[in-house]
Image (tube, rainbow, N blue to C red):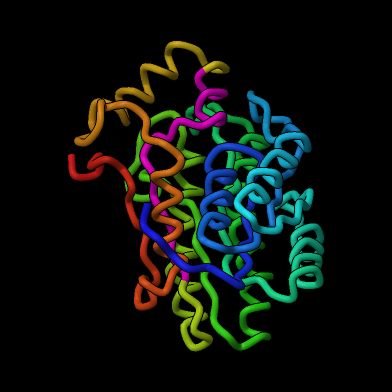
Amino acid sequence: MVEYDFGGQVAFVTGAAHGQGRSHAQHYAKHGADVVVTDINRNMDTVPYDLGTPEELDETVSLVEEEGQEALAIEMDVRDESQVKSAVDEAVDHFGTIDILANNAGIAHFGDLVEIDEAMWDEMLDTNLKGVWLCAKHVGQHFIDRGDGGKIVSTSSIYGKVAGPGSGHYIAAKHGVLGLTKTLALELAEYDVNVNAVCPTGVETPMVAGVMEAYGEEALETATEMTGPWNIFGDGGMIESKDISEAYMWLSSDAARYVTGIGLPVDAGMLAK
């Protein structure tokens, strides 16, 4: 593991109850940051698997504390601006600052664009795109107000760069994350704020496991066709959360001080195919 120094810094991580968000929180703590861990802590109507729970978020807190860092847990729905603003205010009141925003929260489900209902579209876009914007809006304003720079890293996807059947609402949201990233990078550059995104291939997480269980063998075959066999590295299957976390750490560090406005693929070579 590459060593970064986030000593004295505070990372604000969304969707941190499990999966990639928990991994990001642990990695920030390993490198010396205190961490604000947030999650919706309840299920959503259109999502066919269990989302994070208060107990899981508490476990993330414990994992951060095991690294010798302080954690602050906040229940927050990224779709609700009042909750996002309140959480950012609480974090700043508690720690005095936020230095890094890790925009990780997201959902997934399947359906052809001519078949999904409006509720599926709305919950997907509100979570995976609007939520990214709301968190960047309020943490970004904090960065502007304090005048000391900052880092914003968001999770897009390989499907922010390409398309595929059966998940057009997800693909639209993830393309949107890259558009937000590029625009925010331009708007916040004068304030010394770096804004980037990570574009993972399939990652072995509770979200992916939940999707597979909910949609059955057909979804597994579709995902395997789209990810596993196309990957160049590894065994052709899913990669691990820690692989995405390492990209988050680099983009959050001074080593990437001149990197902004990019969507960094961590895809085991999938896009090269």
Q: Is residue 81 magenta?
A: no
Residue 87 placement (x, y as % from top left): 77, 61
Q: Residue at x 46, y 33 (%)?
A: 167
Q: Nearer the viewer, residue 134 or 104?
A: 104
Apparent side of residue 95 relative to residue 226 in the rendered image (left or right): right
> Against 101, is 93 above or below?
below
Residue 24 placement (x, y as % from top left): 53, 50
> Against 127, is 203 above or below?
above
Q: Judge whether residue 125 can be spotted in this image.
A: no
Q: Residue at x 64, y 24 (%)?
A: 48
Residue 203 placement (x, y as % from top left): 43, 35
Q: Residue at x 41, y 74 (%)?
A: 254
Question: Hey, which residue is sitting farthest top in the picture?
Answer: 217
> Against 98, is 115 above or below?
above
Apparent side of residue 159 relative to residue 68 in the rendered image (left or right): left
**Quadrant of residue 117 in the image?**
top right
Residue 246 placement (x, y as % from top left): 41, 52
Q: How many marks?
A: 0
Q: In the rendered view of the protein, which quadrant contains the C terminus?
A: top left
The stretch of residues the image draws in magenta is 195-212
Q: Is residue 206 magenta?
A: yes
> Against 259, is 115 above or below?
above
Apparent side of residue 145 relative to residue 33 in the rendered image (left or right): right
Q: Nearer the viewer, residue 9 or 240?
A: 9
Q: Judge whether residue 74 can be spotted in this image.
A: yes
Q: Residue at x 23, y 31 (%)?
A: 230
